[in-house]
Image (cartoon, rainbow, N blue to C red):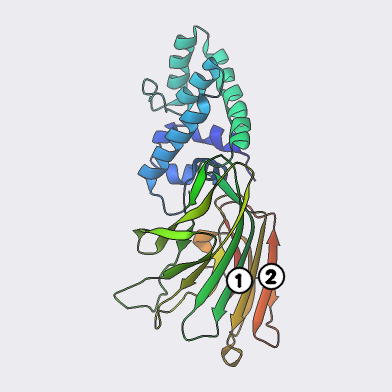
Amino acid sequence: MPTLVDELKRLRRGRGVLAPNIEVLAGPGLRLVCGIAEQDGPAVVRQKLGRRLGELATRLPDDLGLALLAALAIHPDARHALLKDRMSWLAGRLGRDERTARRRADDACLLLAEAAAKAGPEDGWYVVSFDALVRLDSPAPSVQERRRIIATRDGLDEIVPSLSLPRHPTDRQRVHDVGASVLYGGRLVRRERPSESHFRFAIALPRVLRAGQVHDYGIELRIPPGQPMRPHYVFVPYRRCDRFELRIRFDPSRLPGRIWLVTGVPVRVVDDAQPSEETLRTDAAGEIHWEFRNLTQGLGYGVQWR
């Protein structure tokens, strides 16, 4: 698995943050550090990378901060298309040769990764534990999600969890939606919808958290009656998550023909994936229960059925 240093070095090749395929170059580590969501388009990804990495660069020594901004084409005077041209510009600013400039850029990547680890994710929180109960034994599917989070900065008063709900291939309804309500631990103050299948729910916390403080909250998601659901529930962590526990309750009279585990799968291939060897069987109540630990950011974990 690439480290954040590896991701930074990969990003600085070619056009840096100005690369046309920036959403591909931004790996899971950078997405976590910069608060980049799955549904963010290239312009938003570019903006978040520039803003967050620029802020972290101010925590480095002046010459290394400048080296980082130049290497990634964030500095307004170093937006050259090629890395070697940006390094030539940096060498001139530092009054050094290009080999020294490249060493400064390497050192900057290492120190920035350390600074990012100390600073934590941009939006100020990560997940200690996530428990999800998926109900498929009722007229319309619903999910109860409970999370325990830890603040990574002082002054955290709002969190914005997100959800991806792609249409089922057979769904021809005009409206595609999901309902949401906070069960405890906050108040739903804003609902955002960047695209048809992506939803964000801004939750105002009942108290302002300091760095290191723990908070629990729960949210219920409801699919409207008659709207089909794709045959999987997969969690893709884009911030640190230490533990994910999933329970799915099927209707015992309508059990799937096959159920299998999804462990560390790229989210874009979930719908194309064939059943894995890790097939599962429901218990007498029609339930599946599984726990995941050591989740890798940007990959999918959950259960799929057919």
Q: List x then y, in percent, for residue 136.
A: 54, 81
Amino acid at pointer 2: Trp
Residue plotted at (44% across, 68% down):
180
Disc 1 crowd rating (10 Å Cα; few below 14, some 14-19, many 20+) is: many
Disc 2 crowd rating (10 Å Cα; few below 14, some 14-19, many 20+) is: few
Q: List x then y, in percent, for residue 171.
A: 37, 78
- Looking at the image, the residue that sits furthest to the bottom is 253
Label 1 secondary element: strand
Is tag 2's residue or tag 1's residue first in the polypeptide sequence? 2
Q: Which of the 4 quarters of the picture holds residue 102?
A: top right
User: In the image, is residue 286 above or below residue 161?
Assistant: below
Q: Which of the 4 quarters of the picture holds residue 256?
A: bottom right
Residue plotted at (38% across, 25% down):
79
Whether residue 78 sits left or right of residue 26 in the image: it is left
Residue 200 visible, this orientation:
no
User: In the image, is residue 139 above or below residue 58?
Assistant: below
Residue plotted at (60% across, 68% down):
132
Is the C-beta separation of discs 2 and 1 under 8 Å?
yes
In this view, the residue in front, 158 or 272, is 158
In this view, the residue in front, 112 or 130, is 130
Q: Which of the 4 quarters of the picture holds residue 192?
A: bottom left
For label 1, the residue is 303
User: In the image, is residue 48 above or below residue 139?
Assistant: above
Mark 2 or mark 1: which is in front? 2
Q: Which mark is residue 290?
A: 2
Residue plotted at (59% across, 49% down):
126
Q: List x then y, in percent, for residue 25.
A: 49, 42
Amino acid at pointer 1: Val
CA distance for labels 2 and 1: 9 Å
Q: List x then y, in percent, for residue 174.
A: 29, 75
